[in-house]
Image: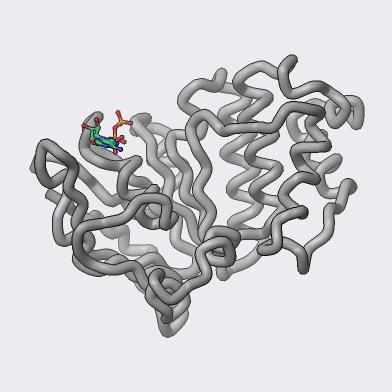
Amino acid sequence: MVKERLSSSVAFGRAIAPLLSIQRLSRRIQSGWIWQDIDFEVWAGDRIAVVGPSGGGKSLLLRAIAGLDSVQAGQIVFDGKPLTQWFLPRYRTQVLYLHQRPALLEGTVEMNLRSVYQFAAHQDKTYDRQPILNDLKQFGRTDAFLERPIAALSGGEAQIVAFLRALQLAPDVLLLDEPTASLDAETATQLEALVERWHATNPHRAYLWVSHDPQQVARISDRQIYLGKP
Ligand SMILES: Nc1ncnc2c1ncn2[C@@H]1O[C@H](COP(=O)(O)OP(=O)(O)OP(=O)(O)O)[C@@H](O)[C@H]1O
């Protein structure tokens, strides 16, 4: 069962076409349908929370939108073009999924930040240290943090690195899967601020954010997509 709650603030000043259109999307696993006939649109500027009980299929929805899992019916249209017609690595630079427990490579923080530029999909971009240093300041960290080995990072620090690695690529849409679930309140607030800054920098941007925390949902979203039993 999917319900969409719209706040009154999202109806005005919109672009003429949605960034993402989710059309009659359905996902089945061995035990049956997780969700069926999901329909909604993501417009430039949207801040959407994906909410509902555990097992409702929130992660599976984000993974499907990211093109990481296949679906049994329906389609996803991004920028006017069905996902099936997108070169997936290119699509995933623009619609970017962030795991709850991000995978980082062995080596230093900076090696991880640089590593994404090796991929063909990012070859039109170059690593820029200064904005990263500015962002790190927000987390109370200096240049020395870039030299830290990944193996020595806390879970929260690893999440910060994953965010910086993703945001430096300037995606259009972020798919955030409980990104602050394992963080202390201060780091969670800082990460929220980082996402808000990324979002506010360009009116073309939007995000879907899975959260179980009603207070966070109120802070970070204008609309909610509910997945689960009615
Ligand atoms: N790859 C998979 N194969 C089969 N079943 C899966 C797979 N991934 C998830 N599931 C099942 O699908 C259901 C929905 O999983 P999902 O992780 O999307 O839920 P969720 O709403 O994100 O839950 P939570 O809030 O606890 O993170 C769960 O019952 C889960 O066990």
In this picture, residue 54 sits left or right of residue 46: left
Q: Is residue 127 left or right of residue 120?
A: right
Horizontal and vertical percent for residue 163?
64, 40
Seen at 25% across and 41% down, the residue is 57
What residue is at 44 percent from the left and 61 percent from the top? 46
Q: In the picture provided, is 98 more to the left or to the right than 225?
A: right
- Where residue 110 appears, as percent x and y from the top left, is 83, 36
Q: Quadrant of residue 169?
A: bottom right
Q: Is residue 13 visible?
A: no
Name above or below for residue 228 compared with residue 19: above
* The C terminus - image quarter: top left
Q: Quadrant of ligand 1?
A: top left
Q: Nearer the viewer, residue 135 or 162?
A: 162
Colour convention of the picture: one colour
Taking depth in this image into account, of 120 and 134 the one nearest to the observer is 120
Report the side of 215 relative to 3 (left or right).
Answer: right
Residue in the image at 88% along x and 27% along y: 147
- Residue pushed farthest bottom? 16
Q: Residue 77 appears in which quarter of the rendering? A: bottom left
Is residue 140 positioned above or below 67 on the image? above
